[in-house]
Amino acid sequence: MKARNLLIDVVTALYLCLYLYAAVSKLIHFDLSVAQMNKQPFPDSYTPVLVWLIPALELLGAALLIADKTRLLGLYLCVGLMLVFTVYVSLVIMNFYGHIPCACGGLIASLRWKQHLYLNISYLLTGIIAILLYRRQDKYHSLVVR
């Protein structure tokens, strides 16, 4: 039971750090975020929405992870975002868009696309494991309380 809780806490902390860093980085370097978003393979008309929506969702996910009552919802949101980002990186690697856009800042910018994909898959898998463990833990607690 302690190992399960420790794993959930470690995964939660990793997601919290990742999404806080990503969101704050995008907001601090807002002009760069707008320029990078305009390099993406979707219409520039989406940029005003995406440059605010993505960091807002990242911050919301991080905030939900902090409280025990909202942690599972936060894990679902963070894993969902990671799934979207992983699919996007996969499409870039498969040359689906015809060019390779550059949109990562900070530490992630130093990764090659395949390394980025491996990092995303690692986060995705550990997030899914944490959700499964968390749900199993909730079922266990509901059985014990009865």
Image: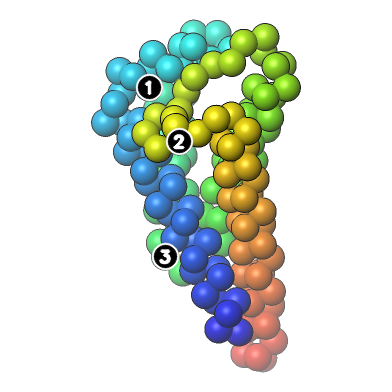
Earlier sequence position, callout 1 versus callout 2:
1
Q: CA distance from mark 2 to mark 3?
A: 27 Å
Q: Can you tell which of label 1 and label 2 is closer to the viewer?
A: 2
Q: Which label was assigned to residue 67?
A: 3
**Circle 1 residues within 10 Å: few <14, some 14–19, many ≥20:** many
**Circle 3 residues within 10 Å: few <14, some 14–19, many ≥20:** few
Disc 2: which residue: 108
- At 67% from the left and 9% from the top, the residue drawn is 98
State which quarter of the image contains the C terminus. bottom right
Inspect the image, locate mark 2, and give the three-letter code of the amino acid beneath it.
Ile
User: Which quadrant of the structure image shows residue 127?
Assistant: bottom right
Earlier sequence position, callout 2 versus callout 3:
3
Q: Can you tell which of label 2 and label 3 is closer to the viewer?
A: 2
Choose between 41 and 146: the one closer to the eye: 41
Give the image location of residue 10, x and y in percent.
49, 66
Inspect the image, locate mark 3, and give the three-letter code of the amino acid beneath it.
Ala
- At 46% from the left and 39% from the top, the residue drawn is 57
State which quarter of the image contains the N terminus. bottom right
Say what secondary structure mark 2 lies in: helix
